[in-house]
Image (tube, rainbow, N blue to C red):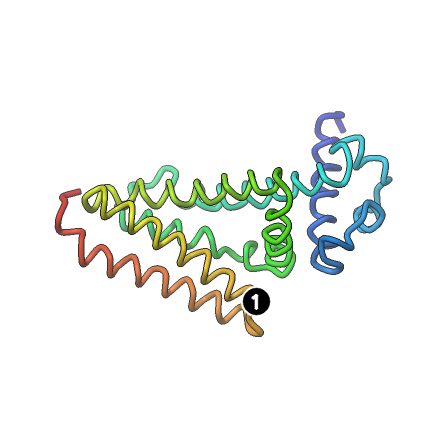
Amino acid sequence: MPRPAMKTVRQQQLIDATLISVERHGLHHTTINTISGLAGLSSGLISHYFGGKQGLIEATLKYLLDELKQALLSRILGKNLSAAERLSMIVESNFTEFQRSAAATKTWLSFWSQAVHDPGLARLQHINSQRLYSNLAFAFKQLMPEDVAINAAKQTAAMIDGFWLRSALSSCPEKEFEQAQILCKAFIEAVIMQHGENKCR
């Protein structure tokens, strides 16, 4: 196997192992040894590929962010979607099976708590928040006046994040995630019904 491909495979193995380690042990008790042990790779590869544990942690968050991005792109690229349909796809991309998995939810929760104290993680979380808001605002602006669209985007982003968080912390997350998705879509439909007639598509 060519070196670049092997490098990519090993990096992904370490990222996957980080997700499992955080799920099992929490972020604070995840170490180079727990990660390398789960990956079945030398601990030295973490420093080689990521510069250490912190670099791997940031790479894992970037992986989660990229999964969110790809989930949306897979739903909208090459499709002639209305703005309302695009908004629905944005909601769905935040509640995919992967994003609802125990490994992803526990890792996101750990990252959010750590981002308060870690500028690098805080920057990545800011990028995530801005991307969600921008995608929502782009679609809402096609349906209603800009000032109303901006408020609608902010409210919808808060609902998606809030419902995701409540679901992740629930004793029955799968059921809560399903209901959260329905409620977010219902809110979008209500906003469009109330304000959408004020601007032609």
Q: Within 10 angstroms of label 1, few (less than 14), some, or many (20 or more) residues?
A: some
Q: Where is mark 1, residue-wise? A: 169
Taking depth in this image into account, of 43 and 79 the one nearest to the observer is 43
Residue shown at the point (42%, 56%) measured from the top left:
160
Residue 150 quadrant: top left
Tell me where residue 170 appears, x and y as whole percent: 55, 71
Vertical placement of residue 126 versus 167, above or below? above
Callout 1: helix, strand or loop? loop
Vertical placement of residue 107 versus 150, above or below? below
Residue type for callout 1? Leu
Taking depth in this image into account, of 40 and 112 the one nearest to the observer is 112
Instruction: Classify the position of the N terminus by image quarter.
Output: top right
Direction from residue 87 to residue 5 in the image, left or right: right
Q: Residue furthest front?
A: 117
Vertical placement of residue 47 versus 36, above or below? above
Residue shown at the point (80%, 30%) measured from the top left:
48
Vertical placement of residue 120 versus 89, above or below? above
